[in-house]
């Protein structure tokens, strides 16, 4: 026995007259078209689920890879030792990049550009760790004069980066500019390593030393 729904469906498909059926069929078709258009314009569509899932998985893999890279880089630095040893190792690394830059000639524009990018990233991360952790801790320890002088020099380090980017890697005075830049970084690093950091470290408790090391590592992780 046919249910009421089945009866309605049956009568709609067969129709009592051909005109009525055509009208209904056309009306249904318009309605379906509109519904499809609505779906395509305002919804993700049937394939969106898997596509969205794949995109999110890609983002997750990218985030995990970046997290792994940061953990590896800062983990290697953390193994270097206390905060002052980590920062001294970063000085050596930056000076090593300068030496590679000074070994280039005017035709090696691509290599010069890549080395400048690498140096900029290294100095940026290094300055961030000092400006966000070590210099504020120095000011707290009544060493504001040294902290302000060192932070002021960071400004001139950024100025050198700006000038090198502006002049371009094939400029005739590129090597001279890099030499002056290296001298500034070397003097700055020497003041930190030989004067300011040792006396600051001597005045610290073991807990404060561990705390500053942990904060430098945390800051370095996010900047890596
Ligand atoms: Fe510094
Ligand atoms: Fe430094």
Image (cartoon, rainbow, N blue to C red):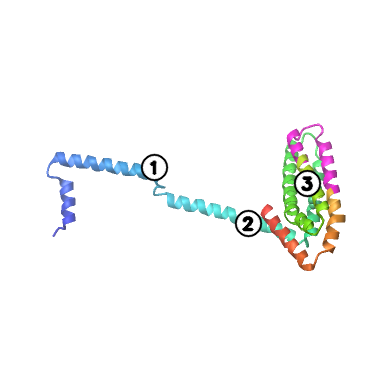
Instruction: Establish whether ligand 1 lies closer than 8 Å to the Cβ of label 3.
Output: yes
- Residue 210: image location, x then y, percent: 75, 65
| Near-viewer residue (179 or 160) | 160
- The answer to whether 33 is drawn above or below residue 129 in the figure is above
Tell me if 184 is positioned left or right of 120 in this view: right
Dot 2 crowding, Cα within 10 Å, few <14, some 14–19, many 20+: some
Instruction: Give the extent of the magenta segment.
Output: 160-187
Q: Position of residue 163 (x, y in %)?
A: 76, 36
How many angstroms separate mark 1 from mark 3 (CA)? 53 Å
Does the segment drawn in magenta span residue 223? no
Question: Chief secondary structure of the magenta span?
Answer: helix
Q: Which mark is residue 154?
A: 3
Choose the circle earlier in sequence order: 2 or 3. Answer: 2
* Circles 2 and 3: CB atoms closer than 8 Å: no
Q: Above or below — where is 180 with respect to 78?
A: above
Give the mark nearer the N terminus: 1 vs 3: 1
Marks 2 and 1, Cα distance to the nearest angstrom?
Answer: 37 Å
Helix, strand or loop status at disc 2: helix
48, 198: nearer the viewer: 198
Residue drawn at x 73%, y 37% is: 165
Residue placed under numbered mark 2 in the picture:
67
> Is residue 65 among what the camera can see?
yes
Please give the residue where the numbered disc 1 appears in the rendered image: 41
Q: Residue at x 54, y 52 (%)?
A: 58
Disc 2 to disc 3, C-alpha distance: 28 Å
């Amino acid at each position: 026995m046919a249910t009421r729904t089945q009866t309605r469906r049956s009568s709609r498909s067969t129709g009592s007259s051909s005109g009525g059926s055509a009208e209904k069929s056309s009306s249904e078709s318009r309605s379906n078209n509109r519904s499809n258009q609505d779906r395509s314009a305002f919804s993700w569509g049937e394939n969106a689920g898997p596509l969205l899932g794949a995109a999110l998985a890609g983002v997750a893999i990218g985030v995990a890879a970046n997290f792994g890279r940061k953990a590896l880089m800062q983990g290697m630095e953390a193994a270097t030792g206390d905060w002052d040893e980590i920062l001294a190792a970063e000085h050596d690394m930056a000076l090593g990049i300068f030496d590679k830059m000074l070994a280039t000639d005017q035709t090696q524009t691509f290599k010069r550009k890549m080395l400048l990018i690498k140096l900029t990233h290294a100095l940026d991360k290094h300055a961030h760790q000092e400006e966000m952790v070590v210099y504020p801790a120095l000011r707290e320890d009544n060493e504001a004069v040294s902290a302000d002088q060192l932070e002021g020099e960071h400004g001139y380090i950024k100025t050198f980066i700006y000038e090198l980017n502006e002049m371009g890697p094939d400029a005739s005075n590129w090597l001279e500019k890099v030499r002056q830049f290296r001298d500034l970084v070397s003097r700055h690093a020497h003041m930190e390593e030989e004067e300011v950091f040792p006396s600051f470290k001597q005045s610290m408790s073991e807990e404060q030393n561990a705390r500053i090391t942990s904060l430098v590592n945390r800051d370095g992780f996010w900047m890596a």
